[in-house]
Image (cartoon, rainbow, N blue to C red):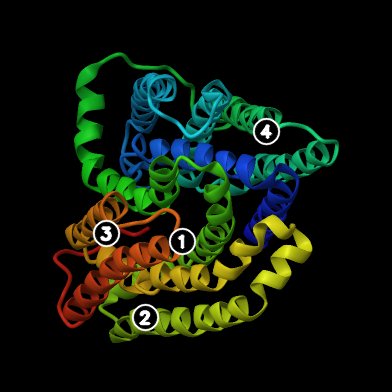
Amino acid sequence: MGNNLAEYGARALYIIFLARYLGVADYGLWSYALALYTFLMSLINFGMESLMPLRVGSGKEGVASYLNETLSMRFALIAIIAILMVLFLLVADVPTASPLVLLWVLPAFIGRSIALWVRVCFTAHEKVIKWLRLSMPLAIAEPLFGIALLISGTELAFILALHAAIWCLHGAIGMWMVRQQLTPIKLTYSIVPITQHLRAGLPLGFSGALMMWLMASPLLLLAHISGDTGLLGIFALPFNIALLLYALLQAFLAAALPVLSRANDRKDPRLRSYGPIILLCAGISMGIAGFIGALYGELAFTTIIGLEFALSGQIIGPCMLLTGILLAPAGFEQSLTLQARVPYIVLANLLAAVVLAVGFLGWVNPQEINSVLYTIAIAWGARASILIIAGVLFAHKSPTHKSEPL
């Protein structure tokens, strides 16, 4: 957990420096670039973060072949998505006069996609500490070098290039570590096993892509309906801070999964209280954060970052409340996952994704930032409602089958 705090602390500091030195327009473009490629990354995951540890941890034979097959699948998906990304950036009406600048996200997408596969490999082999020895220095290096470049007056293109270089280095060293410490790497060109892995991971992959869309689409859709990177930057700063806080809290909740899995296998009645406790904690903590943000947000943002981010400070409070809405059903979602009731999670994410898309394309006025916040709140609230209701209904019923140890 100390590693998580250090990493997210460095990222939060980097966000502040990025906004202060890039200004609203270039910060908006930076946020658009990262939202675009992180969403596209979710399209190649196919549940591997869950399926690979279960398969490797089962002790069955053929682990090396399995890993090589999943790596081959990842490379194939990377190639397909990379081609689509380039076509999109060259053909679509992206919110910048220089779309070629955004092509720097392509190597970042490739390197980060490989690095995430490597991380899951080490997690599956229960050797995550070795991976952290590589990832933590690089995770800290980007903010440190980036801040130095920003202070020296560099442009956005160099910041994106640094981001790409760090993740390419991440992926290259990670692949070398897998080969040296885990298993030989030999790509397979057989379609049959890759197709099988795609089918097996489709439900979890679809759910994960929907969840990432819920977090990335407000920035992507706002950029395209407004065409104003300045407005995007003003909204993106508090929204990114809210998402960073959500990611940090989710990391803490994920650490409880092994305990929850054992409790679910024992049918421990105390598990029924887990969802309501997380709901209560999220409501109270984010309610307090929202209140503080509403009181002092504008003063803090204009003092630390600059006057052009005054509106960002005004909406940091509501963005904290959005974090609470997103986090509120997390306990129920974990319980539903352990009970193999993933379709309810998919349904909740799908409904929220549809509401977001319809809202942004239908009734959102990009010049009225409150309409953006209301639309996100309605979509995320609909998701939370379904997960909470399903979690409560199934809390008193036996799971469909015994959960696998996580």
Residue type indicated by callout 1 = Ile
Of the two numbered discs 2 and 1 on the same chain, state the one appearing first in sequence: 2
Q: Is residue 168 left or right of residue 159?
A: left
Calculate the distance from the C-alpha at mark 3 to the C-alpha at mark 1.
19 Å
Crowd around label 3: few <14 · some 14–19 · many ≥20 (10 Å): many
**Label ID, residue 352:** 3
Crowd around label 4: few <14 · some 14–19 · many ≥20 (10 Å): many
Residue identifier under label 1: 369
Q: Residue 338: horizontal and vertical position, in percent?
A: 28, 65
Residue 153 makes an appearance in the image: yes
For image coordinates 84% across by 41% down, the residue present is: 151
Residue type indicated by callout 2 = Tyr
Calculate the distance from the C-alpha at mark 4 to the C-alpha at mark 3.
33 Å
Residue type indicated by callout 4 = Leu
**Label ID, residue 274:** 2
For image coordinates 78% across by 32% down, the residue present is: 154
